[in-house]
Image: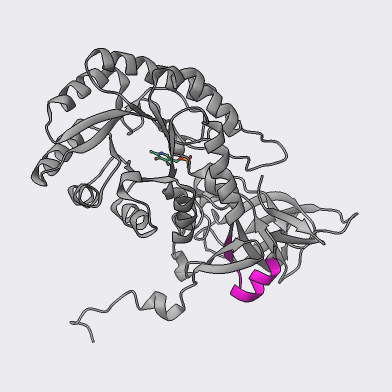
Amino acid sequence: MDHFIYRDGMLHAEDVPVTDIASSVGTPFYVYSTATLQRHYQVFDEALAGMDHFICYAMKANSNMAVLRIMAQMGAGMDVVSGGEYARAIAAGVPGEHIVFSGVGKTREEMVLALNGGIRQFNLESEPEMRVLNEVALSLGKVAPITVRVNPDVDAKTHAKIATGKSENKFGIPIAKAREVYAEAATLKGLEVVGIDVHIGSQLTDLAPYAAAFKKVAELTETLRADGHDIRRLDLGGGLGIPYERSNEAPPLPMEYGDIVRETVGHLGCEIEIEPGRLIAGNAGLLVTSVIYRKEGEGRDFLIVDAAMNDLVRPAMYEAHHDIIPVVEPAVGVEPAKHDIVGPVCESGDTFAKERNMPPMEAGELMAFRSAGAYGAVMSSEYNSRPLIPEVLVHGDQFAVVRARPTYEEMINRDSIPDWME
Ligand SMILES: *Cc1c(COP(=O)(O)O)cnc(C)c1O
């Protein structure tokens, strides 16, 4: 559920007509709904009720400072994957003790930053990384709380680019090797083992891979405890999918996911951590764009819009589907026709949708890409020297620009000409 609905024939973001935002900031832009973000956090919180749990928002999905502040105010921790994300989390008011550091290639500099600023735990992904963190912690006179990310070798049945839990993926250590790695961790004075971590992929639309992975983690918990490790926290990662195509997708609900967690690891008395990203932010955002031209082709018409693959790369990168709707609700009886919806960038990959049924639209009319709140703005670039598009946050009947569109000058002035040139 989200808060983007038609009212009086006009798409609204909460109580704000999307056209009001468009006139104020110009297109294209992202718009996020505060109420939807809050609701998605609450849904997870309720799904895990009865278990000791902590929700760490995976901020790589959408790391706008205003979004982070909303999450922080809800009581969420953060799952970060870089020093930059760590710095953003701190700047948004998240205490270090609520920040989990994930990622396969943490650098020494990032470790120092997090150890000095405070950290809930590092999720380690290899033995070399474990040894380096030990060294860094000792050099600072600190002890780093850690989990080891295990790779359970389950097929998440998602897009290959976002599956992470098979043995051929670069993530984590093979679960069969876990005892050995934890045994070494226990000898390292700069580390304190606090639990186990697993994350098998993103946009999962089936609970079976979760159940399989969590069962393996439950068994491993017992084994490691028998080996003398104090496994008191299980980080189960994120990855729950959202319906990108509402007419024919119904991924499992957080409640059902919560039941799987309860059934598989609920008996262990561990604190449960989860790291949802997409499910929190995805359906809390739209990308709004306007038609530049309508071009008649053979057998189909093209709608050339002012957003492009640099603004939203998911269709080009993952063959992702986004539902696309007109901002002005089509009148009853208007016949939709097949359109290709494309951006202006000089790449055939800059195609958002092929043969998509849309009501007839003309230049200047607005459309909205649904489910664009996660992995949208964060993955955007200035390819073709198209300035980053603004992000807008809505709260009830108010809206604010939470990242402004840079001017051409600002964009250009980030470059510099070396002294030796004229
Ligand atoms: C990307 C990622 C997440 C979030 O995944 P979503 O599909 O957005 O929920 C959580 N944990 C880790 C370690 C990740 O890399």
Position above or below: 260 against 349? above
Is 254 one of the magenta-colored residues? no
Q: Which residues are magenta?
A: 18-31
Position above or below: 365 against 51? below
Q: Residue at x 26, y 42 (%)?
A: 105
Q: Residue at x 81, y 53 (%)?
A: 336
Image coords of residue 262 (percent x, y): 50, 22
**Quadrant that contains the N terminus:** top right
Residue 368 at least partly seen: yes
Position above or below: 12 against 152? below
In the picture provided, is 405 more to the left or to the right than 326? left
Position above or below: 420 against 302? below
In the picture provided, is 384 more to the left or to the right than 81? right
Image coords of residue 53 (percent x, y): 44, 33
Numbered disc total: 0
In the picture provided, is 56 more to the left or to the right than 139? right
Residue 379 at least partly seen: no
Q: Residue at x 53, y 31 (%)?
A: 49
Q: Residue at x 30, y 28 (%)?
A: 195
Tell which residue pokes out farthest to the bottom in this image.
422
Is 20 one of the magenta-colored residues? yes
Residue 344 falls in image quadrant = bottom right
